[in-house]
Amino acid sequence: MKTIYLDNNATTCIDPIVLDKMMPFLKDRYGNPSSMHDFGGTVMHDVDRAREQIAGLINADPREILFTSCGTESDNTALLSALESYPDKRHIITTRVEHSAILNMCKHLSKKGYSITYLPVDHEGMIDLRQLEEAITPDTALVSIMYANNETGVVYPIDKIAQIVKERSVLFHTDAVQAVGKLPLDLKELPVDMLSLSGHKLHAPKGVGVLYIRRGTRFQPYIIGGHQEHGRRGGTENVASIVGLGYACEIAQKHMDYENTEVKRLRDKLENALLSIVPNSILNGHREMRLPNTTNISFEYVEGEGILLLLNEKGVCASSGSACTSGSIEPSHVLRAMGVPFTAAHGSIRFSLSRYTTEAEIDFVIKTVPPVIDRLREISPFWGKDNLAVR
Ligand code: PLP
């Protein structure tokens, strides 16, 4: 059975060119970039080329690229660095729909006495910019708002948000883990101070990320050790993955148009078909302000886990918004924040495409999902004939 992989917001396959470029550093060129001898020292040129390639994708200066181990580390570093750099300020503003890399760090910080404002979102997943303005106080060390939501794909107006925050001279960080490689980004135009990205979301390997830090931004390291990364992060560089991420960024730039035309067309085809064929199906998130590859659909009166298991039997990989917490299935915090009713939030499925997704795969999924939902509804105690009238 062939696997149809529509879970690219969870992780992506490594581009074969990226893998080729990485291989020498996993075999013969294993030197430490900090070594004095040429065998190691020349590897630093490859790390620096990757810095340039990544800077090229987001129109930054290579010196503004700090290598980390993942998106989570980048997010954690941004928050902790802001608080350490401005020790008199003890307030952070974020949203209720961030990734756990931000939310759980905020939870941890609030236990340590910091105050956190979680901006609410409306039913489309959008924040209210006036609420953001009102939340900023002289005590605010950092505003951290994601570029694009991993579950719904909702894209936030980061240009407007950054402008509001910078007018008040507060640090601004954006978690762009889901946006980089899918949307064009220009950090010469966008006044963000820090930005997180992660290799494995854009066809580079797992275990490498970047924190972009605008030149002149006050910064304190999170990982303290050697002098690597100009003293901003200790630890011997993950050279092969860094090299891979560099090439992945270069390739992503070449595919940017395809991502926003062809991948989007396939996403729209899947979304429109499922919404029209399956009764009581609802799109979650803003219809326009969205990543081109993501659709999140609720199938009312069924459990997302049930859908995933039956799709899995057909070789289709997707993801549900719910998570199993202490024995019971909890709907996603993102959908709850958007006020999605319980009966719909439980049956939400995220399909996330990539440039490797084919038309034939989408056609197969369009044929496969409706009977799966029918089968589950037949055994659902909440589903009756009356529900059909709702639509
Ligand atoms: N932020 C967002 C929006 C994400 O989607 C993810 C991963 O799913 C992360 C952060 C964490 O990235 P990583 O898996 O590289 O730690």
Image: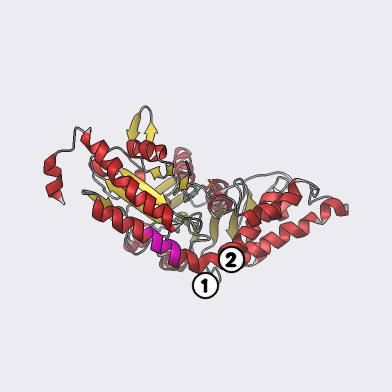
Q: Locate residue 8 relative to residue 378 in the image: left or right.
A: right
Q: Element under label 2?
A: helix
Q: Tell me if residue 204 can be seen.
A: yes
Whether residue 266 appears in magenta in the rendering, the answer is yes
Distance, label 1 to label 2, CA atoms, is 13 Å
Q: What residue type is labelled 2?
A: Leu
Q: Is residue 257 above or below residue 391?
A: below
Whether residue 303 appears in magenta in the rendering, the answer is no
Number of numbered discs: 2
Q: Locate residue 371 relative to residue 80 in the image: left or right.
A: left
Q: Report the residue marked by disc 1.
A: 189
Q: Locate residue 151 relative to residue 184 in the image: left or right.
A: left
Q: Report the residue marked by disc 2.
A: 57
Q: Element under label 1?
A: loop
- Percent position (x, y) of residue 315? 44, 41
Question: Most extreme residue toward the bottom, as rendered?
Answer: 189
Identify which residue is drawn at 41% across, 39% down.
Answer: 312
| N-terminal-most mark, 1 or 2 | 2
- Percent position (x, y) of residue 330? 33, 36
Q: Which amino acid does label 1 sit on?
A: Glu
What is the crowding at mark 1: few (fewer than 14 residues within 10 Å), some, or many (at least 20)? few
- Of 292 and 340, which appears nearest the observer? 292
- Magenta segment's dominant SS is helix
